[in-house]
Image: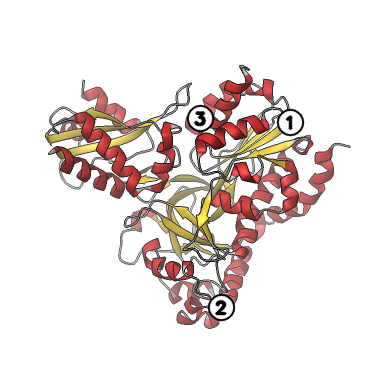
């Protein structure tokens, strides 16, 4: 008997549970809210916000404000130092390290043992369940899954307490049975030197029967290119003929899709998008013919949404899931079994349908570049430019930056178009200082720049005088509140500007 059909029976109950999303979304989310409030009632946060009195969504929303990382940071830091019952019951020992904050190089997202099970592992289980439902003739369990992970390190030297990439936390705590169907071995998976890790993964997996891949597209592509170098083959399906699916997430897949198609020529290859982050696992592609993701609503995550056009207002509208409108851009707010309460995650979503609720990730609440998992925000850019100006005597009048996506050799970089009011004494030095300082203040950018493996040194293009004003004028947006987009995942703006710069 096909081993996948036999193992697939384990996932049938979850497939049926997810079908209830079609008709019971409001009730499911209400139960999640009630459970979170009940579980955390005796924590410091629960007592301060009178969780014992919360029975309705209206009471929940009234009990506490919407929070950013900065508002929760002091509580999280106390938890990292070993304090119990602060934001979540007991002692939370794991912290997922992520960049993207205004004031710090990294933020540390608590990952409780409950959150590991009912958010992160639940998402991984459902990814397989929904894939098998769409592909009943799958043979993915006839071989092994190549799962990429990061690394972790001690947390303040507390016993059994660690910080690191979420993927490393998941691998460290995974059910031993899963290790029977995954590669590489834990010692390789958790290596911190990606160059060494990439080579070891390629060599460990080269002669294995790999049927599925899981990871961030940019990191995975780098590993696969190393597999091709060692194997000497032209196509990946010559190395792994039974490869059938790539579960991908972390960054948009669009820039990589064509490269994967060129690398994997098997017509039966599938690509399934997942929306998982340090803060939680939120969405899965339940229909591979529909790019929208289905919101996973029965995990340890309660969702709220703020219309983006109200986000900067003193008292913006905040609605639960049942209050969203199709086609409207929302900032997502989450409360989780890891102790994040009404947390503004920074992502924006747009719903494409209800019953079940499906959405696309429409961007971030602020300008950013996250083409390769680097999560570069405007605050990083401003600080990097200030340091470069200080080092070279330059003054910047305007700038924008965007990614140059990987070419056939897996090379990629950020391209900066900068207009100077006072030119630097050396353009090369300006670019070098900017690149170095971005690594110093953003741990994700630093990781992607490590040994030029994923990101090459940034490219600096000098803009002619008045280029940005001319561009705004051409669009009828000169003056007033109109601003130049500083950072963008898209090359639309920078291409228009470079065209005018010639």
The answer to whether 471 appears left or right of 106 in the picture is left
Residue visible at 61% across and 30% down in the picture:
202
- Of labels 3 and 1, the one closer to you: 1
* Picture coordinates of residue 109, whole percent (x, y): 48, 59
Say which element carries label 3.
Answer: helix
On screen, residue 18 above or below 409? below
Q: Nearer the viewer, residue 110 or 131?
A: 110
Q: Nearer the viewer, residue 418 or 441?
A: 441
**Residue 209: numbered disc:** 1
* Picture coordinates of residue 329, whole percent (x, y): 42, 50
Cβ–Cβ under 8 Å for marks 3 and 2: no
**Among numbered discs 1 and 2, the one appearing first in the sequence:** 2
On screen, residue 30 above or below 131? below
Q: CA distance from mark 3 to mark 1?
A: 24 Å
Say which element carries label 2.
Answer: loop
* Picture coordinates of residue 412, whole percent (x, y): 41, 29
* Picture coordinates of residue 351, whole percent (x, y): 51, 49
Residue 267 is drawn in which quadrant?
top right
Q: What is the count of numbered marks? A: 3
Q: Mark 2 highlights which residue?
A: 55
Say which element carries label 1.
Answer: loop
- Of labels 3 and 2, the one closer to you: 3
Res. 477 visible in picture: no
Q: Quadrant of the C terminus?
A: top left
Q: Mark 3 highlights which residue?
A: 256
**Among numbered discs 3 and 2, the one appearing first in the sequence:** 2
The answer to whether 384 appears left or right of 394 in the picture is right
């Amino acid at each position: 008997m096909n081993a996948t059909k036999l193992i697939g029976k384990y996932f049938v109950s979850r497939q049926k549970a997810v079908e209830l999303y079609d008709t019971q979304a409001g009730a499911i989310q209400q139960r999640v809210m009630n459970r979170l409030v009940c579980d955390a009632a005796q924590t410091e946060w629960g007592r301060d916000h009178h969780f014992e009195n919360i029975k309705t969504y209206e009471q929940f929303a009234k009990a506490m404000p919407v929070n950013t990382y900065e508002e929760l940071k002091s509580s999280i830091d106390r938890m990292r130092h070993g304090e119990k019952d602060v934001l979540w019951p007991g002692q939370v020992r794991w912290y997922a390290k992520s960049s993207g904050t205004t004031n710090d190089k990294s933020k540390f997202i608590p990952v409780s043992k409950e959150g590991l099970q009912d958010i992160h592992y639940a998402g991984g289980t459902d990814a397989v369940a929904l894939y098998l439902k769409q592909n009943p003739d799958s043979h993915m369990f006839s071989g092994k899954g190549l799962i990429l992970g990061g690394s972790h390190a001690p947390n303040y030297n507390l016993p059994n307490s660690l910080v690191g990439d979420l993927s490393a936390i998941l691998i460290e705590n995974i059910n031993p049975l899963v290790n029977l169907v995954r590669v590489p071995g834990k010692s390789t998976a958790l290596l911190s030197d990606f160059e060494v890790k990439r080579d070891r993964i390629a060599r460990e997996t080269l002669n294995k029967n790999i049927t599925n891949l899981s990871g961030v597209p940019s990191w995975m592509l780098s590993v696969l290119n190393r597999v091709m170098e060692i194997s000497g083959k032209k196509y990946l399906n010559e190395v792994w003929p039974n490869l059938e699916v790539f579960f991908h997430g972390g960054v948009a897949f669009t820039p990589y899709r064509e490269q994967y198609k060129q690398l994997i020529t098997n017509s039966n290859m599938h690509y399934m998008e997942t929306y998982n982050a340090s803060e939680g696992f939120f969405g899965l592609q339940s229909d591979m013919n529909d790019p929208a993701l289905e919101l996973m609503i029965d995990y340890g995550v309660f969702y709220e949404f703020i219309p983006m056009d109200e986000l900067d207002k003193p008292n913006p509208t905040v609605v639960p899931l049942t209050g969203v409108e199709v086609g409207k851009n929302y900032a997502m707010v989450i409360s989780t079994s890891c102790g994040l309460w009404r947390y503004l995650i920074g992502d924006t979503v747009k719903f494409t349908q209800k019953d079940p609720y499906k959405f696309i990730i429409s961007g971030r609440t602020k300008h950013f570049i996250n083409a390769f998992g680097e999560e570069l925000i405007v605050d990083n850019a401003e600080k990097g430019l200030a340091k470069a100006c200080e080092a070279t005597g330059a003054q910047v009048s305007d700038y924008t930056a965007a990614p140059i996506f990987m070419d056939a050799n897996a090379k990629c970089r950020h391209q900066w178009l900068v207009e100077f009011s006072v030119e630097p004494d050396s353009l090369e030095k300006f670019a070098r200082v900017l690149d170095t300082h971005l690594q110093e203040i953003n741990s994700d950018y630093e990781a992607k720049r490590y040994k030029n493996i994923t990101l090459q040194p940034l490219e600096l293009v000098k803009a002619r005088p008045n280029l940005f004003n001319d561009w705004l004028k051409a669009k009828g947006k000169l003056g007033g509140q109109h601003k130049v987009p500083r950072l963008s995942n898209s090359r639309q703006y920078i291409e228009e500007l470079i065209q005018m710069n010639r």
